[in-house]
Amino acid sequence: MSITDLLYEWGIKLPEVKPPEVPPDFKTRLLWTLGVLIAFYIMSLIPPYGLEAVRGLAPEAFQLILASNLGSILAAGIGPIVIASIILQLLVGSGLMDIDMRTDEGRAKFMAIQKLFAVIFALFEAWVYVSTGFLKAAPGMELLVALQIALGSIFLIYLDEIVMKWGIGSGISLFIAANVTKAAMWRGFGIAPQSYLMGLINALSTASPIWWTYLIPYIITLLVFLLVVYAEGIHIDIPIALSYGRGAGGRYPIKLLYLNVIPVIFAVALFANIQLLAYMFKDTPIAPFLGWYRAVHTQGGVTYELAGGLAYYLQPPYHFMDDLTLLLTTGKVPSTFVPNLIHALIYILLLTITSMAFGILWIELAGFGPKQIAEQLASSGFGIPGFRRDPRVLEKVLAKYIPTIAILGSAFVGFLAGFTDVFRGLASGMGILLAVEIIYRYYEIIMRERILDLYPALKKVLG
């Protein structure tokens, strides 16, 4: 028995959500999805019993893309599920694990092994959070706190299954969009003193000359939303036709966002991990290169913020907008404006280049390259009109477009995320990109489901 088969045997022993015997209608699926969403929000408010304090530093973007809340049982969020999925896709895409994703059996095997990996990573990550002191548990309560955090992530695994089998779309996407939306709504429209809405109201009531600066986050967020939606419609169509039957064919679209926002997710995750490593090694000889911290004394105690090194330039300059506001309102150039401007440019450039690098890597490792797509189309009976049916012909044509478009799309989302971080949207750039992309996908799914409910005969055509 191979390792793949052995992992599959272990994976199918885990409990699973039973699929419906009869496909539920749209209203039922919508209710299940809303129920899961409510459960996610409730869980994000439940603190682990025995947790004393959150002592670690975690970038906002890192928490948003992992749908985590460090003070709750969802401290690890969907991190274990995401890591399990990425590792498994890399193993399958590189050929190290033999799973044929084109068959129902292969997809079932993939899902079972992914669930097994996710459970293992949930237990491991929860213990790392507690054992390293990232989350400080009361004496003697370390194991209990770690178990609650692990169970929080494991519960999300099953909520994801409920959405996929009984609801609409993907639970993982739903959790990310919900987390980002919550953060954006709280920051943009909350009643807390630190929200932009309350800042705008106070500025208008006191006739402050900088009232307009509170509108920038709303404008940036709206701009990103419109740009992503517009980019969704940009694509190149490759003419294809079935090798049998006259007139049977169509076009294979290669979208500008060919890889969606996956490259920038990897880039932000890499930046976040380097920052966490810099914090762990802040008192070691490698600190001047990796990143050094300075102590900041506040009423709540002493916290640390990055002051230099590689990790410093892998986070946006948080005071750049303050300097820009002062410059535009008074005409005076703050002493920190130029260093913060250079920091902003370096951050956007590094995020863009890193996203491009991950885009190039991902199209090959995840099976999105010209060769893999050509083989999939050829196995389905498609070819290029006027040429004989041969995957090599398809690959040659696709190779003219896919790598270039993947790089351009990765650069676009990387630049957009960096720009949003620097100019302060309602959430992190990565968070807004993910939320817009996911909400747009949900819109497409809901519209499709509504049409199929109104015209059931189309199900036979669309599948």
Image (cartoon, grey):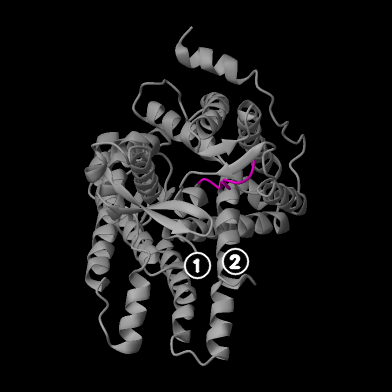
x and y percentages locating residue 383 in the rendered image = 34, 41
**Residue ID at (71%, 32%):** 17
Q: What residue is shown at x 48% (from left), y 89% (from top)?
A: 208
Asked if one can make out residue 387 in the rendered structure from this viewpoint, the answer is no
Label count reads: 2
- 432 on left or right of 256: right
Q: Which residue is mark 1?
A: 426
Question: Looking at the rendering, in which quadrant would you find the C terminus?
Answer: top right
- In three-dimensional space, the C-alpha distance between marks 1 and 2, rounded to whole angstroms, equals 8 Å
Residue 38 position within the rendered picture, expressed as x and y whole percent measured from the top left: 72, 51
Magenta segment, prevailing SS (helix, strand or loop):
loop
Residue in view at x 58 percent, y 54 percent: 179
Report if residue 67 lies within the magenta region: yes
Left or right of 208 in this view: 34: right
Element assignment for label 2: helix
Nearest the viewer among 417 and 17 is: 417
At 59% across and 77% down in the image, what residue appears? 198
Q: Residue furthest bottom?
A: 207
Q: Amino acid at mark 1?
A: Leu
Instruction: Give the numbered dot on residue 185.
Output: 2
Q: Extreme top residue here?
A: 1
Q: Quadrant of residue 196?
A: bottom right
What amino acid type is highlighted by mark number 2?
Answer: Met
First in sequence, mark 1 or 2: give its number: 2
Tell me the magenta residue range. Answer: 66-73
The percent position of residue 78, horizontal first and vertical second, equals 55, 40
Compare residues 340 and 142 and report the one nearer the observer: 142
Q: Secondary structure at mark 1?
A: loop
